[in-house]
Amino acid sequence: MTEQTNPTVARGGADDGGLHRAIGWPQAFWLASGVPALVLFSIGGIAATIGNPSWAIWIISVSFGFLQAFIYAEIAGLFPSKSGGASVYGAAAWVRYSRILAPLSVWCNWLAWTPVLAIGGGLAAGYILTVFFDADSAVRSWEIVLVNLDFLKSDLALRVDATFLLGALILLLVFAMQHGGVLRAAKFQTIMGLAVVIPLLIVGFVPLLSGDVLAENLTPLKPLAFDDAGNLTEGVWDIPGWTLFLGGLFIAAWSAYAFETAICYTSEFKDPARDTWRAILFAGMLCIVVYTVVPLSFQGVLGVEGMLQEGIVDGSAVAGAMAGMVGGGSVVFSLMVIMLILALLLAVMTSMAGSSRTLYQGGIDGWLPRYLGRANSHGAPANAMWTDLGFNLILLMMSDYLFVLAVSNCCYLIFNFLNLNAGWIHRIDSADTPRPWRCPTPLMAVGVALSFVNAVLLGAGANVWGEGTLMSGIIAALLIIPVFAFRHWVQDKGKFPQQMLDDLHVSSRDLDVRKAGVLPYVVLAAGIGVAIVANQIFHL
């Protein structure tokens, strides 16, 4: 992108191959409006894992996400000409201390966000097939297994079936919609966002107001357990019980923190200084409401036994359950199915918009292959979008979407740890850089503390979702090493792009100036140590 003399008011143009300054914070808010729908991805899975405390897990998790957002709002304001979200802004803090940690932040954020395309597209395809075809229909039952992946997880495989074919079509439609640039996508998502958020709020508030939420379905706050006969019973808060609780917080973070995607569009804001912090904080407030009332009502009406029914855990029966919650018949059921399909499409659009911009900025800044840093004439990161699409067509073949979600969340918690600590590193190394919005120092301290909470969740909670989940997540994160090595030492001959250095207001020599000294290394070592200790203490 051509360097602008005043990045806070500049607009990209079709002739510079960059993104366009075309939106304000309300458009970014609606671009992030697919995040509330992510509660539908794992609301059943968490309830089936921890039991009664599941509604409390959602409230705790979204509260963590909101507190963390204040740090992300500050560091985003430091870079009005960058897109790609918090990981890009955090990478700029870590690059002085490690050439590997900086791209790791960007890579892990992308690996966390991009599977929403496959998971959302697959679930939406499943709902559509459920409406039009019986369970024993040949359309729904045929399957061709391409690769067996039992070495990663039992019964995991790459397969082609009707869900894959229809899901691939959905992803192509979303791609076509976003190919026309951020303004067109934002207008479309504003309409879809209203069509999704309003029904979600209805599902959340109607049972609460009608008295259908029963206190006995929400208490006692004890973990899920089964007796010798396989009957549901109350667990106890021993090591396995706390492990299940931390496993619930682990998987909820993937959804409940995700509104940070609202700051992926900083270089496309007309006024970054004004729009950046408003976008993330207003998106966070919406998520606090949805992630509180929807799980509370869902569990309060169904109870844990109801949420353990077949189809709730994998999401296929959520529409029928929600229709029943608001007292609807067949018409309301059909409306709920349509709403859920739109919600999943909205989540897919939000993910493609955010994750592709992370790839795009990674290509601009020298973290990822150069071809990703190109935009089309509409100001859309087309090459990054094609990469997103191709990767997710592979994930769409996976037979277990919950495993994909759990592995991607390992990467997400790594990203959150690095970026929450990037806030204070920027305070030390870039103290003189203007900050359009400054996070209150006590909230900065809370965010740093939460970075270690996330390290605990990573170490203790990942393997609740299957043996090998944590190791698979670590391997996925380490794949950045050959990717970055190719870009940095093969394509760029060991030098960073000038634009990245200009954004940091430094020269190549200045990258060797580390005002924070050994503190970032101490914090990193402490985080790794916390995750290892948590992994050894908490087990089932």
Image (cartoon, rainbow, N blue to C red):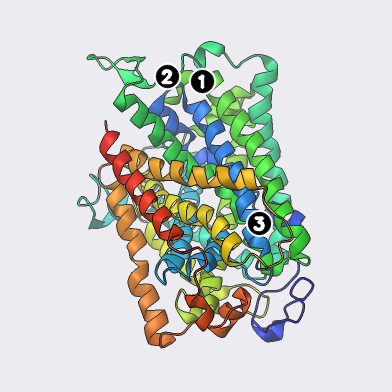
| Quadrant housing the C terminus | top left
Q: Give the residue at mark 1.
A: 302
Amino acid, disc 1: Leu
**Badge 2: residue crowd in 10 Å (few <14, some 14–19, many ≥20):** some
| Residue at the (56%, 42%) spot, across then down | 446
**Which residue is the site of mark 3?**
74
In three-dimensional space, the C-alpha distance between marks 1 and 2, rounded to whole angstroms, equals 7 Å
Q: Is residue 332 above or below residue 5?
A: above
The answer to whether residue 466 is visible is yes
Q: Nearer the viewer, residue 94 or 119?
A: 94
- Residue at image location 48% in from the left, 71% down from the top: 96
**Whole-percent x, y for residue 130 in the image:** 47, 40
Can I make out residue 341 in this image? no
Residue 165, quarter of picture: bottom left
In the picture of the structure, the residue carrying the numbered disc 2 is: 305
Above or below: residue 324 compared with residue 79: above
Expressed as whole percent of the image width and height from the top left, the position of residue 133 reads 45, 41
- Give the spatial CA distance, label 3 vs label 2: 44 Å
Q: Earlier in the sequence, mark 3 or mark 2?
A: 3
The answer to whether residue 450 is left or right of residue 178 is left
Picture quadrant of residue 84? bottom right
Marker count (numbered): 3
In front of the other: 3 or 137:
3
